Amino acid sequence: MKIIIARHADPDYEKDSLTEAGFIEAKSLAKRLSKIEANEVYVSPLGRAKATCREYEKISGKRAVEKEFLKEFNHAVYDSEIGQMNQPWDFMPKYYFSHSKLRDYDGWLDSECMKSGDIKTHYDKVTAEFDKLLALHGYERDKGFYLAKRPCNDTILLFCHFGIECVLLSHLASVPPLVFSQSFCCLPTGVTTIVTEEREQGIASMRCIGFGDLSHLYADGIEPSFSARFCEKFTDDTRH
């Protein structure tokens, strides 16, 4: 099976919708994704994801099912570097790389930072709901891999957010989500594709064959948005 994760288009966070450029991006994404035969489509309940998904629905004729667990993973933790509450996936590099526990799959949830926001409870809730969805398509989680109870060629499409995407990839790859949020960047309308691999009968692993792909924007001559990135040089007049 295939799992396709599409990040929402350029966001207007104040309105929980899209910017003018975002609606153009969403149309480009919709053209691309409408060519894929998706068996099921799921969307976050937040406005920016739903606005992006609506463009896809207009072209494809499909209707997405809203899933609460696809909301952005916004559960505040105490960040001692800045001395205040922060997102659990956005840290200054000095803080992140000086706390090795955050890069340890068996230990990141036990770090003082993550315990300050009870992230384990939120993470377990999201991943349990994700596994329920995969089980509907015949794949049941067992010790990090999946039992292929009813192997299939289904394609499921998820419209959501970068933070929650990091959580889902973390679960599938058995690595802390901060590995993705700190060292990778999925720009608006980035498309990530994961496929099952059943090298042993009945046992499936999940493998990413494309992360944050923006080829649809380049094909349409659209410059990708900067959202989710930070300045390349500190002296740049861009997002810090």
Image (spheres, rainbow, N blue to C red):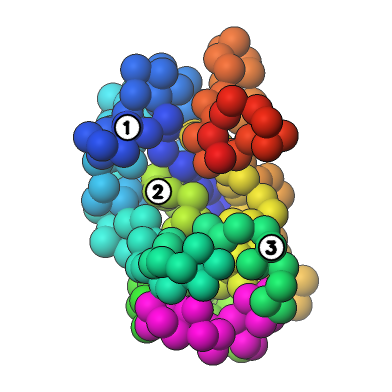
Which percent across, then down, holds residue 33?
48, 32
* Residue at x-position 41% and y-position 38%: 8
Q: CA distance from mark 2 to mark 3?
A: 28 Å
Q: Earlier in the sequence, mark 1 or mark 3?
A: 1
Q: Amino acid at mark 1?
A: Asp
**Mark 1 vs mark 3: in front:** 3
User: Left or right of 114: which side holds 143?
Assistant: right
Q: Which mark is residue 94?
A: 3
From what the image shows, is residue 98 above or below residue 30? Answer: below
Q: Which mark is residue 160?
A: 2
Q: CA distance from mark 1 to mark 3?
A: 29 Å
* Residue at x-position 26% and y-position 47%: 46
Q: Which mark is residue 12?
A: 1
Closer-to-camera residue (190/121): 121
Q: Which secondary structure class fits the magenta region best?
A: helix
**Mark 2 vs mark 1: in front:** 1
Q: Amino acid at mark 2?
A: Cys
